[in-house]
Image: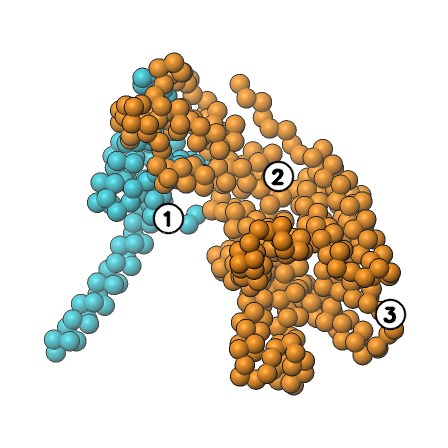
């Protein structure tokens, strides 16, 4: 919510248009305004209704009038900006806004890590001819698809660097491009194959895991949020982690350890789990903001969702046990984080 | 602050007199010759940002047909910001006009 709605002061005589004589259009517009936070409506509802009704003129109820979609969309956009508060917003709305923005940053950091090693693997295939199965034969359609997918994945890395360096628009565009292959891979089979229930649960889980940070980026970094330029070290950290994961994978492959399948569960998504757990412990043991606790909880639950839905495809033994241990770790920390975040959230200002 | 076109037009609409919500919508429509038609949600988003930056302020409140009507006025800071933005836009337009004139003259020669 904008601070200005508060700074303008309470209305001296709020209109109490007799609800009995309220037109159908007004009632419907007031229903739309319920999208806005209560504190915002307390300040603005009456004058917004006045402006809308003056613009709409007298429309008889018999015509069953409704607010136009454009008006509804404008209120929805205002509601998103108000609920995910930016600089100067009331503390509880700012906390929710920061939570969503942190979910975007944490989720994009993971996507940036994956994007980098996907790009490096492709480069290795193209330049050194390694892993033909990864990118198909030269000149084939599979090769074209692999290049497009890898370049899209690299866009997630660009998106993370862009948002950390304060380039919001670039970050939004590249994040959407980065998520596009996952959307195509998961949504098209779901649509073609009929009911979602016929597909493995890991597919919608992957879709949610990919889309949530991008949506958080699109919604959370709105016009009321001043772009912030963070250090380059932070911008490049996921790229370094991506290279480390890649190095770990090559090492495992080179060592050819027997029965080492469970070790692969600590790469990619598995790398994020211990890093996340370490961060969770820091947030729980230090006086962190509610936004950090809630965002860490949300991202932990996203990781948990992906691991849980993948359990069915794992063989019994060390791999299954490892995945179960990761799920237990995620659950054991995500729940206290949610509780701590909810407790630390500032209370909304009481409405008169 | 990055001044968007709706913000610029809303500030311009308040130069001559304080206006209420729908009054601003109408004036913006007139100023832009129908090109910019503010939705109510958009208008209040714009007013929020302008008020937060101290460029507009509440002038007065009236009760009309049982509903609240608020009038907003341009502040001195708002007038300065509008003047600076108008000067910037005029300079850009002048540069474009000069180049177009040169291009036309070059083509004629």
Which residue lies under the disc numbered 3? A259
**Residue A232 point in image, percent of width and height:** 62, 63
**Residue A94 point in image, percent of width and height:** 58, 38
Q: Chain B appears in which tint? A: cyan
- Say whether mark 1 and mark 3 are on the same chain: no
| Residue at screen point 12% across, 78% down | B109
- Quadrant in the rendering for residue A117: bottom right
- Quadrant in the rendering for residue A271: bottom right
| Residue at screen point 78% across, 46% down | A331
- Looking at the image, can residue A24 be seen? yes
Binning the other alpha carbons within 10 Å of mark 1 as few (below 14), some (14 to 19) or many (20 upward) gives few
| Scheme of image coloration | by chain
**Could you tell me which secondary element the residue under label 1 belongs to?**
loop
Q: Which of A195 and A258 is in front in this view?
A: A195
Which residue lies under the disc numbered 1? B4
Chain that is orange in the image = A
Label 2 or label 3, whichever lies nearer to me, is 3
A41 displayed left or right of A235:
left
- In primary-sequence order, the first of circles 2 and 3 is 2
**Could you tell me which secondary element the residue under label 2 belongs to?**
helix
- Relative to A91, residue A117 above or below: below
Which residue lies under the disc numbered 2? A95
**Could you tell me which secondary element the residue under label 3 belongs to?**
loop
Q: How many marks?
A: 3
Cα distance between the residues tagged 1 and 2: 27 Å
Q: Nearer the viewer, residue B101 or A217?
A: A217
Label 1 or label 2, whichever lies nearer to me, is 2
| Residue at screen point 26% across, 35% down | B26
| Badge 1: chain ID | B
């Amino acid at each position: 919510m904008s601070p200005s709605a508060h700074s303008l002061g309470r209305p001296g005589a709020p209109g109490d248009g007799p609800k009995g004589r309220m037109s159908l259009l007004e009632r419907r517009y007031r229903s739309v305004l319920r999208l806005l936070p209560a504190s915002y409506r307390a300040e603005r509802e009456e004058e917004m209704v006045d402006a809308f009704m003056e613009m709409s003129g007298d429309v008889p109820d018999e015509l069953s009038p409704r607010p136009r979609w454009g008006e509804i969309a404008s209120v929805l956009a205002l509601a998103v900006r108000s609920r995910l508060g930016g600089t100067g917003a009331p503390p509880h709305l700012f906390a929710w806004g920061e939570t969503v923005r942190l979910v975007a940053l944490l989720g994009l950091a993971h996507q940036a890590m994956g994007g980098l090693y996907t790009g490096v693997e492709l480069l290795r295939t193209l330049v050194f001819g390694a892993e033909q199965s990864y990118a198909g034969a030269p000149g084939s359609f599979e090769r074209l698809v692999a290049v497009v997918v890898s370049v899209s994945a690299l866009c997630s890395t660009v998106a993370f660097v862009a948002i950390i360096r304060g380039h919001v628009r670039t970050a939004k565009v590249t994040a959407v491009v980065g998520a596009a292959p996952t959307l195509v891979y998961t949504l098209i089979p779901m649509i073609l194959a009929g009911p979602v229930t016929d597909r493995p649960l890991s597919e919608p889980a992957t879709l949610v895991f990919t889309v949530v940070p991008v949506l958080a980026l699109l919604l959370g970094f709105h016009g009321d949020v001043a772009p912030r330029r963070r250090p380059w070290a932070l911008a490049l950290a996921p790229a370094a982690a991506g290279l480390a994961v890649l190095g770990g994978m090559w090492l495992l492959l080179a060592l050819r350890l027997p029965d080492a399948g469970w070790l692969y569960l600590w790469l990619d998504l598995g790398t994020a789990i211990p890093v996340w757990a370490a961060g969770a412990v820091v947030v729980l043991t230090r006086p962190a903001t509610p936004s950090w606790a809630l965002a860490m909880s949300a991202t932990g639950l996203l990781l948990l969702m992906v691991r849980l839905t993948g359990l069915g495809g794992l063989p019994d033994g060390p791999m299954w046990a490892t995945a179960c241990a990761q799920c237990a770790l995620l659950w054991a920390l995500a729940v206290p984080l949610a509780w701590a975040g909810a407790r630390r959230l500032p209370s909304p200002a009481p409405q008169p | 602050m990055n001044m968007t076109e709706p913000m610029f037009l809303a500030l311009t609409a308040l130069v001559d007199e304080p206006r209420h919500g729908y009054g601003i919508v109408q004036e913006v429509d007139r100023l832009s010759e129908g090109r910019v038609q503010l939705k109510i949600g958009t208008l209040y988003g714009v007013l929020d940002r302008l008020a937060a930056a101290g460029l507009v302020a509440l002038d007065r409140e009236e009760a009309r047909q049982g509903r609240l009507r608020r009038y907003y006025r341009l502040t001195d800071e708002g007038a300065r910001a509008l003047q600076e933005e108008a000067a910037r836009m005029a300079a850009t337009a002048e540069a474009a006009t000069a180049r177009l004139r040169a291009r036309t003259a070059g083509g004629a020669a």
